Image (cartoon, grey):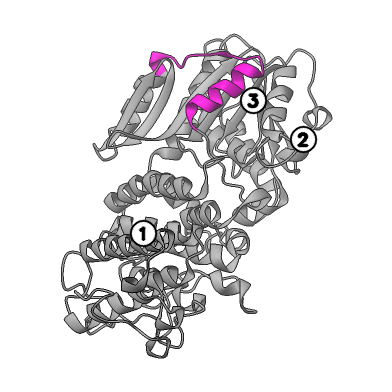
């Protein structure tokens, strides 16, 4: 390995595209939309690898398999070609220690401040070489995030070149996640994270025989079923003696949660109560359904009719941030249940602006004097965490999800790629690439949600042992790596003991 004392690299020896970084060549989705007028659609090569253009920046010509995909020559996916590695070392040396044009002569430096600066850069260079030699994808991704935070664009460009050789949308879970995290970093540089988030909605299938991507995710992983079943269990228990039930769902989506609830309430001793559901939904969610809330009304009404349950559906086609008391059409004598399933983290809070809709909606719910309020949220801290810790938290949270998908669908399964791209990648890109109001994926940990509910005047409504046993029965049909923890009446669903989703209930 060469050191800065043995060889200096001149500006003329640098590849012409090493600065500024060529962002377009790293795109797995369409992060280059901020750089050129292109459509907001994902782009993949036929073999499932991220599309990239020929690269002249800090080249690392890894050995290629016949189908032109990256074929690692070692477990680290880092080339053992001495010439290629030496070339990249020279590039990184230039990026981190400077060029001859900087007129830096280490032996001639006498000022302690300048010596310290060069020493720090030298240590950074040596550390980066060790990271690259280890070929640890997680380390390299974090190093790239830190380089972006430090505005070290030479280093960022070179690390992205190396990372592009190591990620794949059809590889191992960490490679697939890495592809989308790299996309998030590229989008952050190109300021295109918001456009990617808006374009990668979960599209409806081409025909009625095919399931939507969201429904596939719903079936292959228990995360959504767990949330819906635990919330429904709390509602059934709270409403067991009521004759008129009004459920207010602040993000009704396709209404799937309420199909099983209608069946459960229909089986109650003494006959079913009358059920009224208020479905709150903004216009953009109609894209995933292929239509407006009328689709949800017809779907739920048909099930209620079959179960002989008196049913009414009230469509509130407005964003949750705009909901006021008059939009809910509360009627005297109703027993109210409020459902916050996977939606409160989309509400901006005091860290975003002056309008704290996250706490406002909790206070609005409290004013209704509900019998029960249910909360289902991902167990992650991506709201107020600074960029680099948020990047690491995103990696640690989503890797178990990608691993659990790997158990259910083959890696070359076309629908698996679509599910991950349209239903997970958009969230990952938004967390990494966006800031301020444009960053809408703002998860909080259970402890923070508990503080918010208590501050709004709620008390815990512990989930019963019956709900717990029902979830355990559900998990028996899935991989045994899923874990369930009952934490003081709060249920935590995880993968290999890493909590992924939390479900709890509250009362006045």
Mark 3 to mark 2 CA distance (whole Å): 13 Å
Q: Residue at x 38, y 71 (%)?
A: 97
Of tags 1 and 2, which is closer to the observer?
1
The residue that disc 2 covers is 323
Residue 448 is a magenta residue = yes
Q: Of the numbered discs in the image, which one, if any, rests on residue 120? A: 1
Q: Which of marks 3 and 1 is nearer the N terminus?
A: 1
Label 3: element kind: strand
How far apart are the alpha carbons under marks 3 and 1? Answer: 55 Å
Q: Residue 338 carries which label?
A: 3
Question: Is 187 on the left-hand or right-hand side of 107?
Answer: right
Few, some or many residues within 10 Å of mark 3 (<14, 14–19, 20+)? many
Image x and y of residue 303, in percent: 57, 35
User: Relative to residue 118, is residue 291 drawn left or right?
Assistant: right
Q: Report the side of 301 relative to 32 (left or right).
A: right
The answer to whether 448 is drawn above or below residue 21 in the figure is above
Range covered by the magenta-colored residues = 445-466
Q: Earlier in the sequence, mark 1 or mark 2?
A: 1
Residue 319 x, y percent position in the rendering:
73, 43
**Which image quarter holds the C terminus?**
top right
* Extreme residue in the front direction: 110
Q: Is mark 1 on a helix, strand or loop?
A: helix
Q: Quadrant of the N terminus?
A: bottom left
Q: Residue 355 shows which numbered tag?
A: none
Identify the residue at horizontal 71%, vertical 14% (top origin).
Answer: 369
Q: Where is residue 52 in the image (x, y as percent from the top left)?
A: 42, 79
Relative to residue 252, is residue 140 depicted above or below?
below
Looking at this view, is 172 or 210 the one in front?
A: 172
Q: For numbered disc 2, what is the local secondary structure?
A: loop
Where on the picture, by quarter, is residue 135? bottom left
């Amino acid at each position: 390995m060469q050191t800065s004392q043995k060889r200096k690299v001149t500006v003329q020896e640098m590849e012409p595209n090493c600065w500024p970084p060529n962002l377009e060549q790293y795109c797995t989705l369409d992060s280059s939309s901020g750089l050129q007028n292109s459509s907001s659609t994902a782009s993949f090569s036929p073999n499932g690898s991220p599309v990239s253009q020929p690269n002249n920046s800090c080249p690392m010509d890894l050995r290629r398999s016949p189908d032109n995909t990256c074929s690692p020559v070692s477990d680290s996916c880092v080339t053992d070609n001495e010439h290629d590695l030496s070339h990249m070392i020279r590039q990184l040396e230039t990026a981190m220690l400077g060029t001859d044009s900087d007129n830096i002569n280490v032996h001639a430096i006498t000022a302690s401040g300048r010596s310290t600066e060069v020493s720090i850069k030298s240590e950074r260079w040596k550390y980066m070489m060790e990271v690259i030699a280890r070929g640890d994808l997680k380390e390299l991704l974090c190093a790239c995030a830190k380089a972006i935070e430090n505005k070290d664009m030479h280093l960022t460009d070179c690390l992205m070149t190396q990372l592009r050789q190591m990620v794949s949308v059809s590889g191992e879970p960490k490679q697939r996640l890495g592809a989308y995290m790299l996309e998030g970093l590229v989008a952050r540089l190109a300021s295109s994270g918001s456009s990617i988030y808006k374009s990668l909605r979960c599209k409806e299938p081409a025909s009625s025989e095919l399931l939507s991507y969201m429904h596939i995710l719903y079936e292959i992983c228990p995360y959504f079923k767990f949330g819906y079943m635990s919330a429904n269990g709390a509602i059934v228990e709270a409403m067991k003696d009521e004759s008129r039930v009004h459920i207010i769902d602040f993000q009704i989506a396709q209404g799937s949660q309420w199909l099983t609830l209608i069946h459960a309430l229909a089986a109650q001793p003494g006959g079913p109560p009358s059920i009224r559901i208020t479905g709150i939904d903004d216009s953009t969610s109609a894209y995933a359904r292929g239509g407006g809330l009328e689709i949800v009304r017809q779907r739920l009404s048909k099930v209620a009719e079959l179960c002989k349950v008196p049913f009414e559906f009230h469509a509130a086609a407005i964003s949750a941030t705009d909901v006021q008391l008059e939009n809910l059409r509360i009627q005297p004598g109703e027993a109210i249940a409020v459902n916050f399933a996977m939606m409160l983290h989309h509400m901006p809070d005091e860290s975003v602006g002056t309008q704290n809709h996250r706490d406002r909606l909790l206070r609005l719910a409290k004013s209704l004097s509900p019998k029960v309020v249910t909360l289902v949220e991902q167990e992650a801290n991506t709201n107020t965490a600074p960029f680099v810790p948020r990047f690491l938290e995103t990696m640690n949270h989503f890797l178990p999800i990608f691993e659990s998908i790997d158990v259910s669908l083959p890696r070359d399964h076309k629908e698996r790629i679509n599910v991950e791209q349209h239903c997970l990648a958009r969230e990952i890109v938004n967390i990494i690439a966006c800031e301020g109001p444009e960053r809408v994926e703002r998860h909080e940990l259970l402890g923070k949600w508990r503080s918010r509910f208590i501050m709004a005047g709620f008390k815990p409504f512990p989930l019963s042992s019956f709900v717990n046993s029902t979830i355990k029965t559900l998990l028996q049909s899935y991989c045994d790596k899923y874990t369930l923890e009952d934490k003081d009446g709060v249920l935590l669903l995880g993968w290999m003991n890493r909590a992924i989703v939390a479900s709890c209930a509250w009362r006045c």
